Image: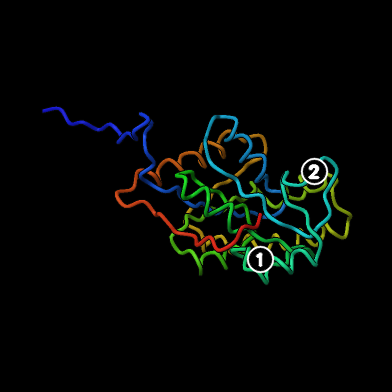
Amino acid sequence: MQLETSSPLSPTGQATISKPGLLFVLSAPSGTGKDTVINALKKKGADFHVVASVTTRPPRPGESDGHPYHFVSQAQFQDMIEKDELIEHAQVHGNWYGQPRQQIADNLQQGRDVLLKIDVQGAATVRQKVPGAIYIFLVPGSVEELVERLNHRQTETEEERNRRLTDARYELAQQEHYEYIIVNRQGQLAEAVNHLQAIMQAEHCRTKPHYVQIQNNTKGL
């Protein structure tokens, strides 16, 4: 007996979307290489949406609105909070960051996986609101590697780097609250990328995948 496993087709002949996407939450200390790992996985052809967070910090050289953040004023950020346009928001390294609700809801409903790239404080808030999300923590090979990366990128003042290193020690202590740990060792990027890809693929192979529902109440970012 041969089982038919083809997807249902719409009247136009296109496969219909019968399942929502999965929500992944990725946290890491500043300088661990979150963007590098994510971009490398994207280049391998992985199809998932990375949420462009909203922030009050000024853009760095080479950054623009939506790449990698939506840059807003303090007043605009407060307005988004009051309109419930952010699924979570927190102050990190002296600036405010938040996750726009509509991006998340729309992509999940369209059957596309969503990855939230947020700090441990924001992840804790999302964990309370969306317990079904999948939580992943990226760590450096060592604290020495982290210091070297922060010094090498030269995007912060010495005071800002010291603050980030202090925060990193606290953040590393929170990794026990995550379901997966990935080590991004210096010179071994491919290993970290492969581990992230394997986690995302494995989550789709569960007998009961962790689908979540995000209420979309607004038309914000």
Mark identifier at residue 63: 2
Q: Nearer the viewer, residue 86 or 217?
A: 217
Residue 134 in the image: x percent, y percent? 47, 54
Q: Is residue 159 left or right of residue 4?
A: right
State the quadrant of the N terminus. Answer: top left
Badge 2 crowding class, 10 Å Cα cut-off, few under 14, some 14 to 19, many 20 or more, is: few
Assign a secondary structure to mark 2.
loop
**Residue type, label 2:** Glu
Which residue extends farthest left? 1
Residue under numbered circle 1: 89
Q: Quadrant of residue 44?
A: top right
Instruction: Residue at 48% x, 43% y: name it.
Output: 112
- Which comes before the other along the chain, label 2 or label 1? 2
Residue 217 in the image: x percent, y percent? 55, 63
Q: Is residue 148 left or right of residue 118?
A: right
Assign a secondary structure to mark 1.
strand
